Image: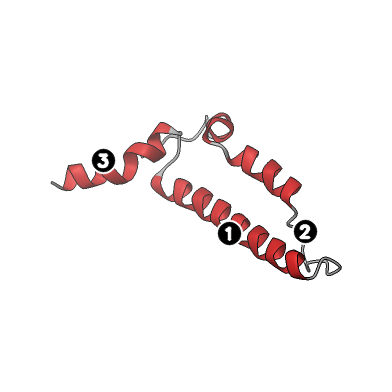
Amino acid sequence: MIERIKRLFNQHPAEVGETYFQHMFQALAVAYRLIATGLCQLVHAFLPFCDPPFKTDIGSTIIFLERKKPESRKSSNAGSKPQ
């Protein structure tokens, strides 16, 4: 039973060449960026003249997300061995 639970938590991260915690960090980074960009766009919708206090425009977010794709991360994690 414990092995099955371990497999549930580790199978997908291992498929993209990461440990559970590496994958968690990557997913949280993407979630944070999407939420921040969404909130900035919401402010921009109502106050188009107002610049957000930090740079989270759509273009930079798309570039950020492209780098976070599993295919991109696999090559950068080639030296680390998933648990």
User: For residue 7, which numbered disc appears in the image?
Assistant: 3
Given the current orientation, which residue lies at the most extreme right position? 49
Q: Quadrant of residue 83?
A: top left
Q: Disc 1 versus disc 2: distance between alpha carbons?
A: 13 Å
User: Which sits earlier in the primary sequence, circle 1 or circle 3?
Assistant: 3
Q: Is residue 51 above or below residue 22?
A: below
Amino acid marked by disc 1: Tyr
Q: Are marks 1 and 2 in contact (CB under 8 Å)?
A: no
Q: Amino acid at mark 2?
A: Lys
Q: Is residue 51 left or right of residue 30?
A: right
Q: Position of residue 64 (x, y in %)?
A: 67, 45
Relative image position of residue 77 (x, y in whole percent): 53, 34
- Look at the numbered disc 2 and give the secondary structure of its residue: loop
Of 3 and 64, the residue lying toward us: 64
The residue pinned by badge 1 equals: 32
In the image, what residue type sits under mark 3? Arg
